[in-house]
Image (cartoon, rainbow, N blue to C red):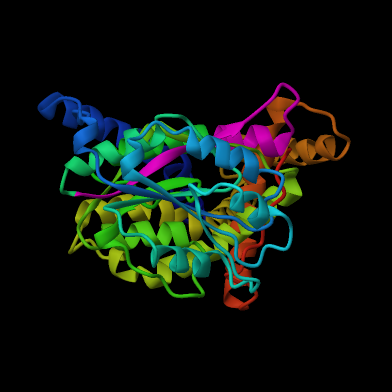
Amino acid sequence: MITALWISLFFVAYTFVGYGFLLYFIIKIKRAFKGKPVIPVVDDTDLPTCTLVVAAYNEEHFIAQKIANSLELNYPASKLKFVFVTDGSVDKTADIIALHPQIQLLHRPERAGKIAAVHRAMEYVDTEVVVFTDANTFLNADAITRICRHYSDKTVGAVAGEKRVQIDANADASAAGEGFYWKYESALKKWDSELYSVVGAAGELFSVRRSLYQDVPADTVLDDFMISMLIANQGYRIIYEPEAYALETASENVCEELKRKIRIAAGGIQSILRLKGLLLPFKFPVLSFQYISHRVLRWTVTPFFLILAFITNFAVAFAEKGVFYELLFAAQVLFYLLAILGFMMEKRHIRIKALFIPYYFCVMNYAVLAGIIRYFTKKQSSVWEKAQRKM
């Protein structure tokens, strides 16, 4: 029991905290020998041609702002194209886009999911680089320039931007928890990128070399993750660029955020099964180490180790194996009580920020368990299941 407890605690601690500390330590050593990475300086004349692709489904409340934001991006006009896909939309999204001749609009009445829309858009992309971004996110003015400058390095096959969650003073658990999570994720991605490569990109903002792009299967759930990782699997690096960011509002509430997290977890299992070659370190040892540490553990065994740690700690503590194990169990009970209290306060719309982190942490891990079940029971569709965002 004690051995099982310590194994469980190790994997939980390593997944959520230990990998970050280890990564930071490795980066410090690397900088001591090689110095900080040099950010490329590229003139406008040397920037690659680029197409901004937006897949929008029933986004009439955001699309006018998205169009204005896209057209205001600082990038040589002769080198930047826009392709918006609105397949399946039944609101005014396509009509609003059609008012702007600068944008190539692709629309069909049939809804086949986001990845089908992306595949169709790629048929019209003839530039060196393609940038993907969501319809309900807004980019900083220099985002495309900051991203595309990295393609002067021939080892770079994809560039991931930063996701930022807009949080106001009255943020609920979904907003505050998601915001904290993405700040931590951004730090990990920055260090991952400096060590070797980011392990996957988020669909809010990422780009790839057009020549390296591969269509993913039509039933792919996490198309953004798979598109970027297939490029990494070709031996190219995915760079993280925090100066290119996509700003979006948080999910409408925890239930909407949970829906999104379950879908991501189901897609994570699917991705692991399809990228099983990266689980072996023979071809790309550093990438495999990053991939397993940052993604695979979170999406597979760690939530089960959380449960095992609680059960074995209970057994060891009540078997009178020492005060330490009793205190450890008391700490676990306190943490979960705080999460339950956070849930109760959230239901009553009482905002206590100290409770958001344990509550959101438990929601995330529950989502992984639910996602695993959903994937293996074949209940996860690749068709968009949009989470409602705060307006």
Rendering coords of residue 351 (x, y %):
79, 27
Is residue 252 toward the left or the right of residue 368 in the image?
Answer: right
Q: From this viewpoint, is residue 324 visible? A: no
Outermost residue, left direction? 33
Q: 4 left or right of 240? A: right
Q: Nearer the viewer, residue 359 or 158?
A: 158
Q: Position of residue 170 (x, y in %)?
A: 76, 25
Which one is in front, 82 or 157?
A: 82
Quarter-of-image position of residue 188: top left
Q: Which residue is drawn at 35% across and 34% down?
A: 75
Instruction: Determine whether 51 is above or below 13 in the image.
Output: below
Residue 74 shows up from this direction: yes
Report the residue that reaches farthest toward the right: 348
Q: Give the range drawn in magenta.
A: 156-181
Q: Does residue 82 appear left or right of residue 384 in this picture?
A: left
Residue 177 counted in the magenta span = yes
Quarter residue 172 falls in: top right
Residue drawn where x is 35% and y is 68% of the image: 275
Q: Where's residue 391, x and y in %? A: 73, 38
From this viewpoint, which residue is outermost toward the top? 169
Question: Residue 20 in magenta?
Answer: no
